[in-house]
Amino acid sequence: MEQELLIAKNEVQEKGFLDVDVDPTLDLFAEIERLKKEKNAIILAHLYQEPDIQDIADYIGDSLGLAQQAAKTDADMIVFAGVHFMAETAKILNPTKKVVIPDLKAGCSLSESCPPPLFKKFKEQHPDHVVISYINCSAGIKALTDVICTSSNAKAIVESFPPEQPIIFAPDKNLGGWINRTSGRNMLLWNGACMVHEIFSLEKITRLKTRHPNAKLISHPECEEPILRVSDFIGSTTQLLNYTKNSPNKEFIVATEAGILHQMVKQAPDKTFIPAPPDNSCACNDCPHMKRNTLEKVYLCMEYEQPEIIMDEELRVQAKKSLDRMLEISAKLGL
Ligand code: SF4
């Protein structure tokens, strides 16, 4: 085992996770609870994580909630069950704490669609523009950004600037386009998108709506415009969750990553949730990056405290400014 562990630790950067066998008889839920206490660790999980991970988490939420929790925790170790940019955000806000992630290779197509060197050139071409970036971006983009936003607060952050202020919005063109349409702004949009939210099929959704005439179509603003145009409600994952809980409606077609259905069913077991179908042969839409994390990998990263998020200090300090501004504006607006 010693030798196997040594090899696994040496390979963690290449593989993204600790590739060691876990005893199949181990009660992983009990072990993770033990490790939480022993190491004063907190598990923050995104709503797109698999149900077992959501059930063992101390806090489940969307990007805004997770960033707020990461900023205020007094735990010594943050276990971030989400994708890389989220764990990186937790590290930016908590330089003295250990931040571990179950799988380093849990990336994000949206974040990867905006490489910092290209974005830097784009920004230099528009020196009079303020840069607002969606939190789904790398630390390199955060460092080039004036204010970060999430889908929960994006519209409010944009509207906190006067209408005449030119703005670059990155990296999600769909979220940026939705804000432009609903706030009357004309922000310059970076051409990035999320692979999960871009492939919903309008045709299949229209057929579903015909079969379920009483169902409300609820969508994340990362979806493309044709889907948003026919949606009954548009919001961040937390806003979608609250909407389904509080709505008198009993049936919903949900156009976002299917992991969120776990909390929707838990909060309103008497209601029906139908995942919106993508434009392929699958019935629902899972993010392959989010689903790289498993309960075994959560246990392993807590037990051996690897893979760990390590950051260049200069980059961290620069990236933190745009996050601090978001947290300040959100607090001021009561979000
Ligand atoms: S659902 Fe889209 S935006 Fe979210 S982590 Fe996956 S690829 Fe990135």
Image (cartoon, rainbow, N blue to C red):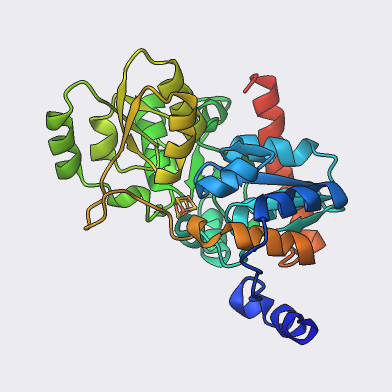
Q: At 61% from the left edge and 64% from the top edge, which residue is drawn?
A: 103
Q: How many marks?
A: 0
User: Is 61 left or right of 7, judged from the image as shown?
Assistant: left
Q: Quadrant of the C terminus?
A: top right
Q: Position of residue 44 (x, y in %)?
A: 67, 44
Is residue 135 shown to the viewer in this render? no
Q: At 32% from the left edge and 17% from the top edge, which residue is drawn?
A: 249
Q: Position of residue 164 (x, y in %)?
A: 49, 28
Query: Most extreme residue toward the top, as rendered?
Result: 248
Occupied quadrant, residue 85: bottom right
Q: Quadrant of the N terminus?
A: bottom right
User: Is 311 left or right of 39, judged from the image as shown?
Assistant: left
Residue nearer the viewer, 135 or 6: 6
Occupied quadrant, residue 62: top right
Q: At 77% from the left edge and 63% from the top edge, which residue is drawn?
A: 303
Compared with 69, 35 (above or below) is: below
Q: Position of residue 247 (x, y in %)?
A: 39, 15
Residue nearer the viewer, 161 or 102: 102
Q: At 44% from the left edge and 60% from the top edge, which residue is drawn?
A: 288
